[in-house]
Image: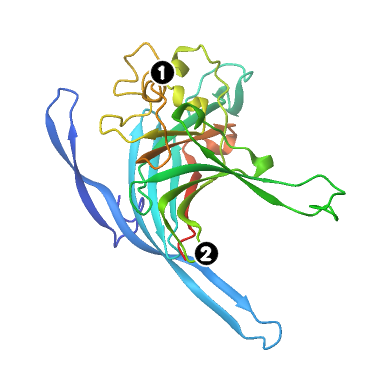
Amino acid sequence: VLGADVPLESRTFPLAAITSTGEASMLPDVVAVYERDAGMFLRHRDPTSFKVTAQRGRELVITHTATIGNYDYAISYIFCLDGAIRVEARLSGILLVQGTKATTGMLIANNLAAPFHQHFFNFRLDLDVNGTANSIHELDVWSPPTPSNENPRGNTMMLDDYEYKFEQAARASVDTRKSRTWMIASTERTNVNGQPSSDMLMPGGNAFPYIVSLALPRTRARFVDHHLWTTVHHADELYAAGPYPNQNAGGEGLPQYITNNEALHGRDLVLWYTMGITHVTRPEDWPIMPVHVAGFALLPMNYR
């Protein structure tokens, strides 16, 4: 909706879709593209001359919104001046409520309780960093024991760079104690310092699933078992939960894609990032929720 979902000056595009009867249909104004002010982009005040160097930011946004049941999901891809790509999910809609005691949810209005719940997204990232010969690395920050030669004052931080070599080993989850990020790097191109040109996957807020492992919904969505999966590119591997997640017995999608445990180094790689949101409901979410925002970023690394 121009002027509500997106700015009035946005450019919109139609989308081809399949109806419930299997017929082709063109939906108008599905995808919007616009540019917006992004606030402060860079700034520094020299402490000697007191001169301020500052620049405003601009962002190019490509977005679409889908209504699924009682929820509305707006997914945006945001291209920034520093080469970063931010992916943002905005959640709104109407809570699923029940007239019962609030033992597994929150009383949000008179005789209305809204259950606590979770949302999970999976993003397929086919990046091709400086070509298709890539590798995938886990980056963890740690502090050496003190006192030691490496950490005499107890304030040293170091970075572990661990390369995943095979698909089944390239499953991992967010670890905030280690400030964990991931890096997909070129195995053929380096910068002037000899470092491989890379894209860093920077997690935002995330969550782990509370639903038990053997529950049917989770067996059909095994991508939630890990925040990161990595596979070798195959044209028919498109969906984290398989092509028909509501009609299979479980285990399709990513668990099947990694059964052959292909080697990863120097290959055309696809990253699959799982993002979870835990919604502790509250009265302020009723009757229509204000948006909740979650996301992650891809940051250029070692290009200069």
Q: Can residue 55 be seen in the rendering of this structure?
A: yes
Q: Name the residue nearer the viewer: 223 or 131.
A: 131
Residue 117 position (above or below residue 38): above
**Where is residue 42 shown, x and y percent of the image?**
54, 71
Badge 2 marks a residue whose secondary structure is: loop
Cα separation between marks 1 and 2: 45 Å
Q: Earlier in the sequence, mark 1 or mark 2?
A: 2
Image quadrant in which you'd find residue 73: top left
Amino acid of disc 2: Asn
**Where is residue 284 shown, x and y percent of the image?**
57, 39
Residue drawn 45% across and 26% down?
223
Eye-nearest disc, 1 or 2: 2
Tag 1 residue: 220
Image quadrant in which you'd find residue 217: top left
Badge 1 marks a residue whose secondary structure is: loop
Residue drawn 61% across and 17% down?
101
Amino acid of disc 1: Arg
**Badge 1 vs badge 2, beta-carbon distance below 8 Å:** no
Q: Name the residue nearer the viewer: 11 or 42.
A: 42
**Where is residue 179 shown, x and y percent of the image?**
64, 45
Residue 193, label in figure: 2
Q: Can residue 94 be seen in the rendering of this structure?
A: no
Residue count near mark 2 (Cα–Cα under 10 Å), binned few <14, some 14–19, many ≥20: few
